[in-house]
Image (tube, rainbow, N blue to C red):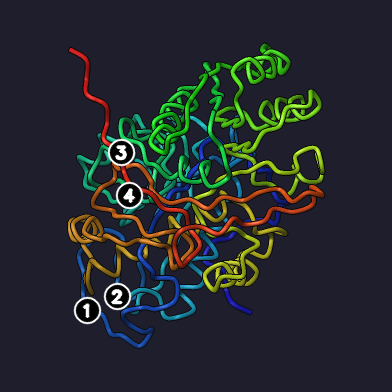
Amino acid sequence: MRKRTTKRPRRPRAATAIAAVIVGLPAALAGCATGSSASGGTSNGPCASPGVTADSITIGLIYPDSGAVSAGFRDARSGVDARVGLQNASGGVNGRKLVIEWRDDRSEPAGFANAAHDLVDRQNVFGLIAVSIGLPPSADWLQKTGVPVTGIATSADWSQHPNLFHFGSIFNEGAAVDTFGKYVRSQNGTRALVLFDPTSSTSKDLAGQFTPSLQSQGIQVVSTYPYTENISSPAQVVERLRATGADTLVGAAQIDSFIDIYAAARQAGLKLNVALSSAGYSPSLLRTHGSAIAGMSVMVDYVPFEQPAPAMQTYQKAMADYAPELADPDDEIALGSYVATDEMIQGLKLAGTCPTRPAFIRNLRQVHDFTGGGLFAPTDLSQPAAPPPCFDFLKVNPAGTAFTVVPGNRPDGFWCGETLEAPPTKG
């Protein structure tokens, strides 16, 4: 039996409650899931870098294990453990085992700052893996200190600092891609109503990306409709759909709101050629709603869990071997954390036999085809502020019992598009 790299009690699987944050774990990481540039037999000399000894490299992990958003993030640790376990089983990185020191940020920016200072200043870790909403106030300090950080983008800050590495961010402002429009057009959408939550800046920004994407493919956006859960009425949206003659509903809102509107539209006899939600890829929705959501489309930016791709099989086996406490590894946060760890490992490999923080940052930023070992479509890490161009689209089958993958425009199944020019600023 293999030894775990971190210790913790077993716990039940936590619910993933932040689909809006992961609405696009967009394309990522250069393939590094299986190979290592050195084996466990490598002999290492002295190395003065923080966290690096002759036989180990210590990395910090910060995530909310308690507090307001902890239920949505706890599976992060399982994803990290699985990727580290897989790497250590093949000899580590250049003969050094990876060791994880984790801290709970209590779902608070102050908690994140305390955890980061402890790990960097006192525990002397080489770098950080951050799966947290609490990073932004600490971003400037982490950049000044030169600490490399990999993780899931939860704000625009992740694209504004050279030492922060994500694998695609829906929070990037400005440019859009034509991918969404290409999918809707392929499904015979011609007139679209775009739904957004006016209380969420993320929702508003995403709606702002959907609109030019649809228009780029000749799809008329007949309405951009604000909808607040528990305040707005599905009947009002249905009436708007009817009045505008929309045959397409595109949602950047809460998934429960989207489903309520979709169900109401079907009950009212409206025929929608396309109903695309930015979130909602969850078996629990199938169990709860069944045939009521038949025909609904959702988008993800990774290989779907149902797809028997080698990269997904590697991930699922690693989760079973090194994170067995997670009964169901088909979880977006676990997958994202696994890939964030893969990104850290790739940076360490590129930093050389005596890795330094500057070499890590410099060399990883030059990777142009990051895929997370095939779990994501290639993304250029030298362009962190660019919009993610590639997604997978899935549609609920007629019985409402499963998601089916809609084949994309690339051999690997992804739908990929081009970046659209931002409209000129009005003077």
Q: Check disc 3 and give the amino acid type.
A: Leu
The spot of residue 426 in percent (x, y) is 22, 15
Near mark 1 (Cα within 10 A), the count class, few <14, some 14-19 or many ≥20, is few
Q: Nearer the viewer, mark 4 or mark 3?
A: 3
**N-terminal-most mark, 4 or 1:** 1
Asked whether disc 1 touches disc 2, contact meaning CB atoms under 8 Å apart, the reply is yes
Would residue 200 be found to the left or right of residue 406 on screen? Answer: left
Q: Quadrant of the C terminus?
A: top left
The residue under label 1 is: 45
- In front of the other: 154 or 289: 289
Amino acid type, residue under disc 1 in the picture: Gly
Q: Earlier in the sequence, mark 4 or mark 3?
A: 4
Residue bearing mark 3: 420
Question: Regarding mark 3 in the picture, which secondary structure is present there?
Answer: strand
> Are the residues at dot 3 and dot 2 in contact (C-beta closer than 8 Å)?
no
Give how far across and how far down residue 389 sits, in percent: 38, 48
Disc on res. 165:
4
Task: Tell me the mark number nearer the camera, choosing from 3 and 2.
Answer: 3
Q: CA distance from mark 3 to mark 2?
A: 48 Å
- The label nearer to you, 3 versus 1, is 3
